[in-house]
Image (cartoon, grey):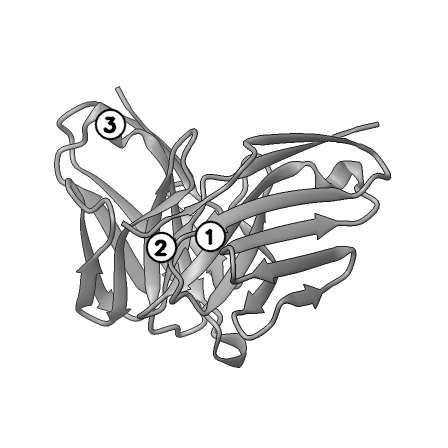
Amino acid sequence: DAGITQSPRHKVTETGTPVTLRCHQTENHRYMYWYRQDPGHGLRLIHYSYGVKDTDKGEVSDGYSVSRSKTEDFLLTLESATSSQTSVYFCATPRLAGGTNEQFFGPGTRLTVL
Amino acid sequence: GESVGLHLPTLSVQEGDNSIINCAYSNSASDYFIWYKQESGKGPQFIIDIRSNMDKRQGQRVTVLLNKTVKHLSLQIAATQPGDSAVYFCAENNAGNMLTFGGGTRLMVKP
């Protein structure tokens, strides 16, 4: 997984509770991404970061916030979890081999909101 | 808006046969495409990529074809094996290091 870890790997929580997912990388990549994956859908970008304290919204950012206080960690927060946020969440970093944007993915976090 | 999609949601092939997975894209400005394989319970894994200035690229048992005229991308797997059973995604590179993913095709290999 190119030095990407995600924690927790599984979480069950209740509607209305805050949840934070962590992505940790060891390759010193500038860019980091958070995606969600749902049945019948491909991966959809939630937020991404292009440096410490530099983040931007993706396609499905509503209900999510992110923070990047240091290069190696990118946090995804659900301020008040809803059942529609039940999903598998993947973090990714680019390899930038030969200038291309191949992305490496972490193992994923399965989140269930009851 | 711009999107990447797939023709077939499920493809079932006999072990040893060749597999072809298709993908249509709509962003004519995309300059780079990737195929990913995702096994159950795991994150997507890179298979092969192709730049828009190419129409074919070969890897080990896999070939990607790009037809820019009709905005079509395909992944060919030769001599499909049970270990190839997975969901396959195409992705296109947008500006600013962003990828847009298709919905995925499940490949099932029958022994």
Query: In the visual, does B105 lie left or right of B79?
Result: left
Can residue A25 be seen here? The reply is: no
**Residue annotated with mark 1:** A106
Q: Quadrant of the C terminus of chain B?
A: top right
Q: Read off the chain for label 1.
A: A
Numbered label attached to residue A23: 2
Q: Read off the chain for label 3.
A: A
Residue drawn at x 39%, y 72% is: A29
| Identity of the residue furthest to the front in this view | B69
Q: Is there a contact, CB below 8 Å, between mark 2 and mark 1?
A: yes
From what the image shows, is residue A105 above or below residue A32? above
Q: Amino acid at mark 1?
A: Gly
Q: Is there a contact, CB below 8 Å, between mark 3 and mark 2?
A: no
Q: Position of residue B44 (x, y in %)?
A: 53, 48
Closer to the chain start, of discs 3 and 2, is 2
| Pointers 3 and 1 within a single chain | yes
| Mark 2 secondary-structure assignment | strand
| Mark 1 secondary-structure assignment | loop
Q: Position of residue B60 (x, y in %)?
A: 77, 60
